[in-house]
Each structure stands twice: as structure tokens, then as C-alpha cells.
Amino acid sequence: MISKTLVIFGGIILSLGIIFHLQGQSLVGPESSFMYKNPEWITYGMQIAITGAIIIISGIIFKFIKRN
């Protein structure tokens, strides 16, 4: 149960990180957003996405450890 929760939570965080990254690059989102065309949010988005990926991987590893 906890591994499934980690994977879902990590997926949400990964998705948000990708969106933030793309907004920083001015590819998505409204131009009135404070993240739009902001180079700091390119970096923040990458960091958030990597954190989400780490949480997903942790959930998958936890699932395999729990099985054995």
C-alpha cells in the first residue's frame, strides 16, 4: 500500500516539476505568471522533477523489498 502511495505522490511531484520547468522556459502557461520566462524556475522545475523521480524509484524499490 505504501509503495503505491509513494509512486502516485512521486508522479504528481514529477508532473509539477516538468510543468514548472516548461513555464520557466516560456513554453506553457499564461504570460502573466511569475514563473513565465523566469530562468530560476527552469532550475527549480528540474530539481522538483528529480525529487519526484527519486520518490517514484523509492516506491518501486520498497515494493520489491517488501515482496522478498
Image (spheres, rainbow, N blue to C red):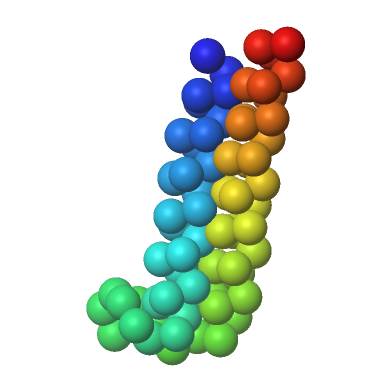
Q: Residue at x 40, y 77 (%)?
A: 23
Q: Position of residue 49 (x, y in %)?
A: 56, 59
Q: Position of residue 37 (x, y in %)?
A: 44, 88
Residue closer to the observer: 45 or 4: 4
Q: Residue at x 51, y 25 (%)?
A: 5
Q: Is residue 51 visible?
A: yes
Residue 3 position (above or below residue 66): below
Residue 3 position (above or below residue 31): above
In the image, taking residue 4 as reference, residue 55 lies left or right, namely right
Residue closer to the observer: 49 or 68: 68
Q: Position of residue 14 (x, y in %)?
A: 50, 53
Q: Residue at x 50, y 85 (%)?
A: 38
Q: Position of residue 22 (x, y in %)?
A: 42, 76
In the image, taking residue 36 as reference, residue 42 lies left or right, namely right
Q: Quadrant of the C terminus?
A: top right
Q: Is residue 34 visible?
A: no
Residue 51 position (above or below residue 18): above
Q: Residue at x 56, y 86 (%)?
A: 39
Picture quadrant where residue 34 is located: bottom left
